[in-house]
Image (cartoon, grey):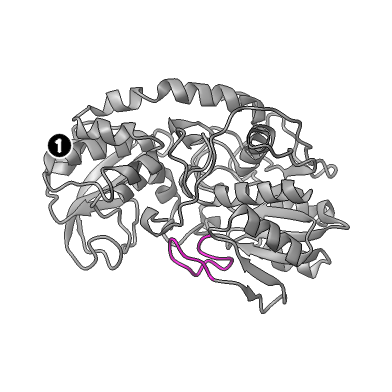
């Protein structure tokens, strides 16, 4: 999801408030919010929990679904196809960035169309304003919104902001909102800087940590209780989260690698998602972040980079990763058609990787080694939108070491963890 091709949406400054959120409890198949075993192979996604209950959560409702190719059951059948075939009154589908069927590249969508299999209208909602969503809901006649998209746990991955916009519209319309929850594939630990006022955009609209450490269901409960009241809207009275069964916060990666579905065209593997919160920061530089290769966000480089970068990074002995000197030629995006030197980040232990640590060290060393390193845009503004403030770019420009940069956000991160602890649905405190 490249920053320069996104529609940057502004959001107002926010303060804290609280409200009560209604849990989903359709019967014996529903997950509770108590501690779960969490052993490998035991995960049941929210969509499968709801389907096992014959989609009873939507009984008597006129439903609009926000989803994409990741919104499938364990048998890989689309939830839209399954719900429509089983009598759920699905009135509309809303396609996010990349589209309902996932055919569009970063910063693009598929347009509004009629789904040929179900005959349901698919509205293009990428970049939609709250007013646009209200119009979609009115035109389609829906009274309940269903959200089912696999997030990857980074603030600048746009699907959570699609959900936030739809939640605001649901509040205005008095509509219900149901989240079919899925695991956070990079785990339940929050890391990184928190978005500061003045840096709201389409890649970050609320004050959350860069690696937020929450599922979309947890984010929805938090947004509903705190952020809707903060902008003068009533919490959604009928917000339900169909919880994942068997997920624990310490779990990272997919429960079953064969079940990994690309959440977006440049998120091909679980390894990509693991590194993304750190290596996606290269979007704000003149270095290629690997778009146009088969390993985006794992291959990073530029025409001016040589062997010294890999050597410098390996000397840091960062946990869970090693850096291989690599050369590649992107077929699209930055440095298209030009041979770039750089590194491929290889994950040696996914349980120990801290993506923000990896990305910060990579940026510090690239800035130190290469005079050709430069920001894209206005004096690091894009880095500000990605990182959440002007501080990160200013520190890099000043030659600040990686540890000092990471220490600079620990206080705000600690406050975010304390603020969100009461909205976690899975196995207690983090």
Closest to the observer, 24 or 224: 224
- Residue 114 left/right relative to 371: right
| Helix, strand or loop status at disc 1 | helix
Callout 1: 10 Å neighbours few (<14), some, many (20+)? some
Where does label 1 land, which residue? 368
For the residue pair 290 and 269, the one nearer the viewer reads as 290
Quadrant position of residue 137: bottom right
The x, y position of residue 386, in whole percent, is: 39, 43
Percent position (x, y) of residue 14? Answer: 57, 33
Q: Is residue 49 visible?
A: no
> Which sits in the foreground, 10 or 207?
10
Magenta region: 97-110
Residue 146 in which image quadrant: bottom right
The answer to whether residue 204 is left or right of residue 61 is: left
- Any magenta on residue 111? no
Q: Residue at x 52, y 66 (%)?
A: 102
Out of 73 and 400, give the one closest to the viewer.
400
For the point 42% across and 56% down, the residue is 1
Question: Is residue 217 rendered to the left or right of residue 175?
Answer: left
**Residue extending furthest toward the right:** 60
Query: Quick check: 430 above or below 234?
Result: above
Q: Is residue 241 above or below residue 332?
A: above
How many numbered discs sit on the rendered protein?
Answer: 1
Does the image show residue 392? yes
On the rendered structure, is 22 left or right of 179?
Answer: right
Residue 180 point in image, percent of width and height: 69, 49
Q: Main secondary structure of the magenta part?
A: loop
Residue that appears at 66% across and 30% down: 423
Q: Position of residue 79 (x, y in %)?
A: 69, 62
């Amino acid at each position: 999801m490249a920053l320069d091709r996104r529609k940057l949406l502004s959001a107002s400054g926010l303060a804290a408030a609280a409200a009560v959120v209604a849990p989903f409890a359709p019967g014996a198949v529903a997950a509770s919010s108590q501690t779960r075993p969490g052993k490998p192979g035991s995960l049941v996604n929210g969509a499968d929990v709801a389907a096992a209950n014959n989609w009873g959560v939507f009984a008597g409702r006129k439903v609009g679904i926000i989803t994409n190719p990741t919104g499938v059951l364990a048998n890989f059948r689309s939830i839209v196809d399954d719900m429509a075939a089983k009598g759920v009154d699905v009135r509309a589908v809303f396609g996010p960035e990349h589209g309902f069927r996932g055919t569009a590249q970063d910063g693009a969508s598929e347009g509004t169309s009629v789904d040929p299999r179900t005959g349901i209208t698919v509205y293009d909602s990428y970049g939609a304003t709250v007013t646009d969503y209200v119009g979609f809901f009115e035109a389609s006649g829906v009274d309940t919104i269903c959200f089912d998209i696999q997030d990857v746990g980074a603030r600048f991955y746009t699907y959570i902001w699609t959900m936030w916009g739809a939640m605001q519209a649901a509040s205005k319309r008095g509509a219900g909102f149901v989240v079919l929850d899925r695991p956070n594939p990079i785990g339940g630990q929050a890391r990184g800087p928190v978005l500061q006022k003045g840096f709201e955009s389409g890649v970050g609209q609320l004050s959350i940590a860069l690696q937020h450490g929450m599922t979309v269901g947890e984010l929805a409960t938090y947004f509903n209780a705190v952020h809707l009241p903060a902008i003068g809207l009533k919490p959604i009275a009928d917000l339900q989260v169909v919880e994942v069964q068997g997920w624990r916060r310490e779990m990272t990666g997919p429960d079953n690698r064969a079940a990994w579905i690309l959440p977006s065209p440049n998120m091909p593997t679980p390894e990509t998602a693991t590194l993304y919160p750190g290596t996606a920061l290269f979007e704000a530089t003149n270095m290629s972040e690997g778009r146009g290769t088969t390993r985006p966000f794992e291959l990073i480089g530029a025409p001016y980079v040589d062997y010294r970068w890999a050597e410098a990074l390996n000397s840091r002995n960062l946990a869970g990763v090693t850096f291989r000197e690599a050369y590649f030629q992107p077929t699209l995006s930055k440095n298209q058609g030009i041979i770039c030197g750089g590194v491929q980040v290889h994950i040696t232990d996914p349980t120990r990787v801290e993506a923000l640590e990896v990305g910060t060290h990579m940026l510090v060393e690239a800035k130190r080694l290469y005079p050709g390193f430069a920001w894209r845009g206005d004096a690091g503004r894009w880095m500000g939108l990605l990182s959440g403030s002007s501080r990160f770019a200013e520190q890099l420009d000043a030659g600040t070491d990686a540890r000092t940069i990471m220490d600079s956000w620990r206080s705000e991160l600690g406050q975010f963890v304390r603020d969100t602890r009461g909205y976690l649905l899975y196995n207690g405190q983090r």
